[in-house]
Amino acid sequence: PGVDIKFPASSITDKETENPFKELAIGTGGFKFSRRELIAGAISTLAFGFLHNITDKGIDTNTIPSSQLFLGAVNWVLQRRFGMLAPILSHARFNHKISNG
């Protein structure tokens, strides 16, 4: 018997996909998510917010990065619906807006 190795993109979905990276790259085109996908989305959103609380002095535990948590959730939905390019452009646009007013 062989070992069944699953890719991360396919391990969070309930359905079998022919190419697990296709959904990651070009998205699903819809807003219907399984419970596993929502849990993965919540975890990635929290990780996105946590990473934005790391400063030169260490981890800032005095603030909650609400805008980063919100943007993390939006970026996750964008990735699931439209693919990887959408959240990358969204993040770049948000950073540009913050930097340049």
Image (spheres, rainbow, N blue to C red):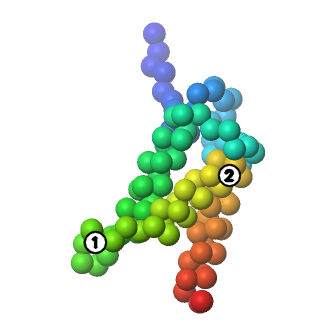
Q: Tell me which numbered mark, 1 or 2, is placed earlier along the sequence.
A: 1
How many numbered tags mark residues here? 2
Q: Residue at x 60, y 81 (%)?
A: 96
As displayed, is residue 23 above or below residue 92? above
Could you tell me the amino acid type at mark 2?
A: Gly
Report the residue marked by disc 2: 83
* Residue that mark 1 sits on: 62
Q: Secondary structure at mark 1?
A: loop
Q: Position of residue 100 (x, y in %)?
A: 59, 89
Q: Residues within 10 Å of mark 2 (few under 14, many from 20)?
A: many
Q: Quadrant of residue 66?
A: bottom left
Residue at x-position 65% and y-position 68%: 89
Task: Measure the C-alpha gap from mark 1 to mark 2.
Answer: 34 Å
Using the image, tell me which numbered label, if any, was put on residue 29: none
Of tags 1 and 2, the one toward the viewer is: 1
Q: Residue furthest left?
A: 57
Quick check: 74 above or below 19?
below
Q: Residue at x 28, y 78 (%)?
A: 56
Residue count near mark 1 (Cα–Cα under 10 Å), binned few <14, some 14–19, many ≥20: few
Viewed as shown, does residue 83 lie left or right of 98?
right
Under mark 1, the amino acid is: Asn
Q: Is residue 85 left or right of residue 68?
A: right
Q: Quadrant of the C terminus?
A: bottom right
